[in-house]
Image: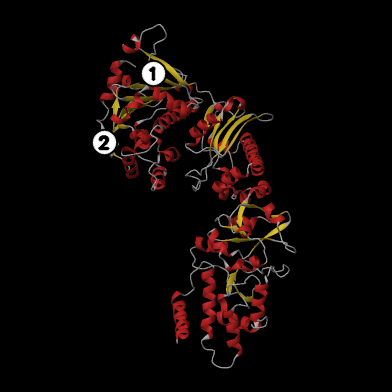
C-alpha cells in the first residue's frame, strides 16, 4: 500500500474517541496505579503471555487462512527499551486487534475476573500473586507505567488503531497511519513511572523474562545496546548501536526429554500455563505412543484456582496439534479434574477440525481416557508414597474429585480408593481412607456409617453420633455439599454398604457399648425401667400428629433427649434439606422420625407425669418443645417460632415459680 493510500485510509476515520472504563475496571486500575505490591516484575510476564497468546491464535487461524502469515511466517515477541526516555515496548506479530476488539478487550471485562480479583484481595496488601489467575494481567502494566499506548493492526486488515490511557478512569481510541503501526499484531508502549525506570534496563528485562517467560512457545528477542567485546572500546554502544539478543527460543518444553528439564524449568512453565505463583503439587510429563501419539505436560496445583467452582466447570488444559495451539477450553479432562493445568499435544488430530467435531472426536476421547487414567494412577502412587503431598492435594481439591463419584461410574472404584474423610475416630484431626475405616470396624459391624452436615464442627456436635461414640464406632464426616449426592450413588466399599446415621434404624444393637464403670453406675442410678417407652411413644405420636412419620426409642442417643432421623426409605436428612432449598420450600418433603432417649431425665420425667394421676394439660407443650429442640439440634429453626417462644416462656415461668 502506498503512502497516499495510507493517508486516505485514516483521513476519513473519525476523530479520537474517549470512553470511560467499566466500573469494575476503573476500580481495578485504581488499585494498580496506587499499588504497593512487592512483586511488580510480573507485569512483564503478563504482557509477554498476552503476546504469546496472540501469536498462538494467529498460528491456529492461519491453518485455514494461510494468507494471513504468508509475508511473515515466523512468529516472535520483540522487546525494546529506551532508558533515557523511560520507555518499554512489548511487540508481537500475532493476531492483532480491531477497534471493536480494543474496546472490548481493554476497556471492559466480559467475564467476572475483575470482580473476583478485587474480592479476593481482601486485606491482602500484596495481591500481585493473584493477578495472573484472574485474567486481568494487562492492567498490571499500570503498576509501573503512568501512561500505556497499545497500537494494533488485526491480521489481514488495512486499518490500525491506537488505544491510550493513563489508568485514571478513561481511555481513548484513534486511528493511526499504517506506517506507524505493526504490519500485523500489537505494540504495547509503556511510559514508565520515575520510580520504575529500572524496567527500561536490558539486564533487568532479561532477568525477568528468563525467570517468568522462558518457555512460552514463541521466541522472545530483546533489542538492546551492543555489548563491547574484549579488545574493543564501547563506542558502538555509546553511539547508539544496538543488537538483538534472544532471551527465549520458543522451544516447547513438553517436546523435550524429562531428563533434560530442571524442577525450576517445570515451575516456570507451570506459572506460564496456570497464571499462578504456587508450586505444582504434581507434575505429569510423558509421551504416549502406540495407537495414538501425544505428549502430555500436566500439573496439579497446590493452591486452588479462583475459578474452581465456576458454574461452567470448564477445564484449563491447552490443546495443541503438532505444536500448533488449537484451544484452551475444550474438555480434555473430565470436569472433576478441571483444576489440572498444562498442555496436551496430539500428533494425530487434523489441524482444521471444528470445535463441534473436536468435542466428539474419537482420537480426542481416547486421549481424554488415557490422560485421566494416568492422573488417577499417579494420585494413587502419591497417596501411598507421599502422604503429606497427597493430603495437601486432597485438602484443596477433594470436593471436586468427589464429583467423579457420581459422574464417572467407570472410575468410581479407583476414586473410592483415593477419597479421604475426617471422622469421629480422632475428632476429625486427620484424613482417613475407606480402607482405614474398614480395617478398624468393630465386631459385628457390617456398615460404613457416615454423617452429612454443613461443617465438620456441626457434624461432630450432632446428637446422632452419641450412640456410635459410646460404642467406639467410627463415623465419617461428610461436610461438602457434593457429599449428599454422591453417597446416594455408591453402593459401598469392599462389600460394606454406606449407612447414614440420620437415616433409618441405628443398627447398633449388635455392637456392645464401651461403657466405663461410671457409665454403668449412672445407668443403674437412672434405672432401666424408669421410662414407659410405650406410653411416651403413643403420647408423642398422638400429640405431634403429621409433624412426624414415626416416634421410637433411640439406640443412637446417649446424652441428648431427642433427635430427628430420616425414614428408612427416605433421603438422608442433609440431602432432603438441600433439595428443599433448591425447590424454595421451607421444610423437607418427608416427615421425619422422632427418636427419644429413654434414659434421659426429661424423658423419664415426662413418662412419670404421663403415668401419674392429675392434670396433664401442659404436657402437650412438652411434646412440641422436644420436637423443636430436635429441630434445633438438627440445624433448623423451630417449626413455629412464636409458639416455641411462648411454650419456652411458660416452662421457664413454672420453673421459677
Relative image position of residue 159 (x, y in whole percent): 34, 25
- Residue 135 visible in the snapshot: no
In primary-sequence order, the first of circles 1 and 2 is 2
Relative image position of residue 230 (x, y in whole percent): 42, 8
Task: Find residue 40 and report its image quarter.
Answer: top left
Residue at the image point whose x is 67% and y is 53% from the top: 434
Circle 2 crowding by C-alpha within 10 Å: few under 14, some 14–19, many from 20: some
Mark 2, residue position: 18
- Residue extending furthest toward the top: 231
Q: Which mark is residue 153?
A: none
What colouring style does the render use? secondary structure
Q: Quadrant of the N terminus?
A: top left
Check the image and report above or below for 564 versus 530: above
**Which element carries disc 1, helix, strand or loop?**
strand
Mark 1, residue position: 223
Check the image and report above or below for 221 versus 483: above
- Residue 217 visible in the snapshot: yes
Relative image position of residue 112 (x, y in whole percent): 41, 45
Query: In front: 646, or 523?
Result: 523
Relative image position of residue 8 (x, y in whole percent): 28, 21
Check the image and report above or below for 56 versus 132: above
Check the image and report above or below for 597 versus 1: below
- Residue extending furthest toward the bottom: 614
Residue at the image point whose x is 42% and y is 46% from the top: 120
**Which element carries disc 2, helix, strand or loop?**
strand
Mark count: 2
Q: Quadrant of the C terminus?
A: bottom left
CA–CA distance in space, label 1 to label 2: 33 Å
Question: Left or right: 66 with respect to 601?
Answer: left
Amino acid at each position: 500500500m502506498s503512502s497516499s493510500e495510507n493517508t486516505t485510509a485514516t483521513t476519513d476515520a473519525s476523530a479520537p474517541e474517549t470512553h470511560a472504563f467499566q466500573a469494575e475496571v476503573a476500580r481495578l486500575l485504581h488499585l494498580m496505579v496506587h499499588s504497593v505490591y512487592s512483586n511488580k516484575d510480573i507485569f512483564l510476564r503478563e504482557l509477554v503471555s498476552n503476546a504469546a497468546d496472540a501469536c498462538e491464535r494467529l498460528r491456529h487461524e492461519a491453518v485455514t487462512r494461510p494468507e494471513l502469515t504468508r509475508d511473515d511466517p515466523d512468529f516472535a515477541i520483540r522487546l525494546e527499551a529506551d532508558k533515557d526516555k523511560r520507555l518499554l515496548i512489548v511487540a508481537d506479530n500475532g493476531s492483532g486487534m480491531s477497534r471493536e476488539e480494543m474496546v472490548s478487550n481493554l476497556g471492559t471485562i466480559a467475564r467476572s475476573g475483575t470482580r473476583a480479583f478485587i474480592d479476593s484481595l481482601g486485606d491482602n496488601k500484596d495481591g500481585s500473586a493473584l493477578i495472573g489467575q484472574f485474567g486481568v494481567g494487562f492492567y498490571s502494566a499500570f503498576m509501573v507505567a503512568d501512561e500505556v499506548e497499545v497500537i494494533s493492526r488485526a491480521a489481514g486488515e488495512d486499518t490500525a488503531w491506537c488505544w491510550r490511557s493513563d489508568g485514571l478512569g478513561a481511555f481513548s481510541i484513534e486511528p493511526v497511519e499504517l506506517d506507524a503501526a505493526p504490519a500485523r499484531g500489537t505494540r504495547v508502549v509503556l511510559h514508565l513511572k520515575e520510580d520504575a525506570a529500572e524496567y527500561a534496563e536490558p539486564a533487568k528485562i532479561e532477568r525477568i523474562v528468563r525467570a517468568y517467560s522462558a518457555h512460552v512457545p514463541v521466541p522472545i528477542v530483546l533489542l538492546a545496546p551492543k555489548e563491547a567485546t574484549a579488545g574493543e572500546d564501547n563506542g558502538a554502544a555509546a553511539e547508539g548501536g544496538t543488537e538483538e539478543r534472544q532471551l527465549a527460543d520458543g522451544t516447547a518444553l513438553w517436546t523435550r526429554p524429562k531428563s533434560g528439564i530442571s524442577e525450576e524449568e517445570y515451575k516456570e512453565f507451570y506459572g506460564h500455563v496456570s497464571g499462578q505463583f504456587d508450586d505444582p503439587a504434581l507434575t505429569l510429563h510423558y509421551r504416549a505412543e502406540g495407537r495414538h501419539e501425544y505428549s502430555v505436560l500436566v500439573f496439579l496445583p497446590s493452591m486452588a484456582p479462583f475459578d474452581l467452582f465456576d458454574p461452567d466447570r470448564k477445564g484449563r488444559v491447552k490443546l495443541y496439534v503438532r505444536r500448533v495451539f488449537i484451544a484452551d477450553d475444550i474438555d480434555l479432562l473430565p470436569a472433576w479434574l478441571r483444576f489440572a493445568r498444562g498442555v496436551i499435544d496430539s500428533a494425530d488430530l487434523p489441524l482444521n477440525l471444528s470445535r463441534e467435531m473436536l468435542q466428539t472426536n474419537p482420537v480426542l476421547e481416547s486421549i481424554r481416557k488415557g490422560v485421566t487414567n494416568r492422573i488417577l494412577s499417579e494420585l494413587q502412587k502419591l497417596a501411598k508414597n507421599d502422604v503429606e503431598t497427597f493430603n495437601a492435594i486432597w485438602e484443596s481439591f477433594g470436593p471436586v474429585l468427589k464429583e467423579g463419584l457420581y459422574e464417572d461410574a467407570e472410575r468410581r472404584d479407583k476414586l473410592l480408593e483415593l477419597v479421604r474423610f475426617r471422622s469421629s475416630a480422632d475428632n476429625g484431626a486427620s484424613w482417613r481412607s475407606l480402607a482405614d475405616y474398614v480395617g478398624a470396624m468393630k465386631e459385628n459391624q457390617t456398615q460404613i456409617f457416615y454423617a452429612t452436615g454443613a461443617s465438620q464442627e456441626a457434624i461432630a456436635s450432632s446428637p446422632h453420633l452419641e450412640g456410635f461414640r459410646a460404642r467406639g464406632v467410627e463415623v465419617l464426616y461428610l461436610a461438602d455439599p457434593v457429599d449428599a449426592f454422591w453417597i446416594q450413588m455408591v453402593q459401598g466399599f469392599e462389600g460394606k454398604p454406606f449407612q447414614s446415621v440420620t437415616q433409618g434404624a441405628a443398627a447398633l444393637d449388635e455392637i456392645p457399648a464401651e461403657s466405663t464403670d461410671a457409665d454403668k453406675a449412672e445407668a443403674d442410678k437412672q434405672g432401666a425401667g424408669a421410662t414407659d417407652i410405650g406410653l411416651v411413644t403413643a403420647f408423642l405420636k398422638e400429640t405431634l400428629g403429621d409433624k412426624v412419620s414415626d416416634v421410637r426409642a433411640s439406640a443412637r442417643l446417649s446424652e441428648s433427649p431427642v433427635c430427628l432421623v430420616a425414614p428408612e426409605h427416605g433421603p438422608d436428612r442433609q440431602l432432603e434439606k438441600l433439595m428443599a432449598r433448591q425447590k424454595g420450600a421451607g421444610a423437607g418433603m418427608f416427615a421425619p422420625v422422632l427418636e427419644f432417649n429413654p434414659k434421659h431425665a426429661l424423658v423419664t420425667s415426662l413418662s412419670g407425669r404421663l403415668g401419674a394421676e392429675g392434670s396433664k394439660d401442659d404436657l402437650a407443650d412438652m411434646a412440641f418443645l422436644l420436637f423443636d429442640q430436635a429441630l434445633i439440634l438438627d440445624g433448623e429453626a423451630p417449626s413455629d417460632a412464636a409458639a416455641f417462644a411462648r411454650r419456652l416462656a411458660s416452662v421457664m415461668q413454672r420453673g421459677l415459680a
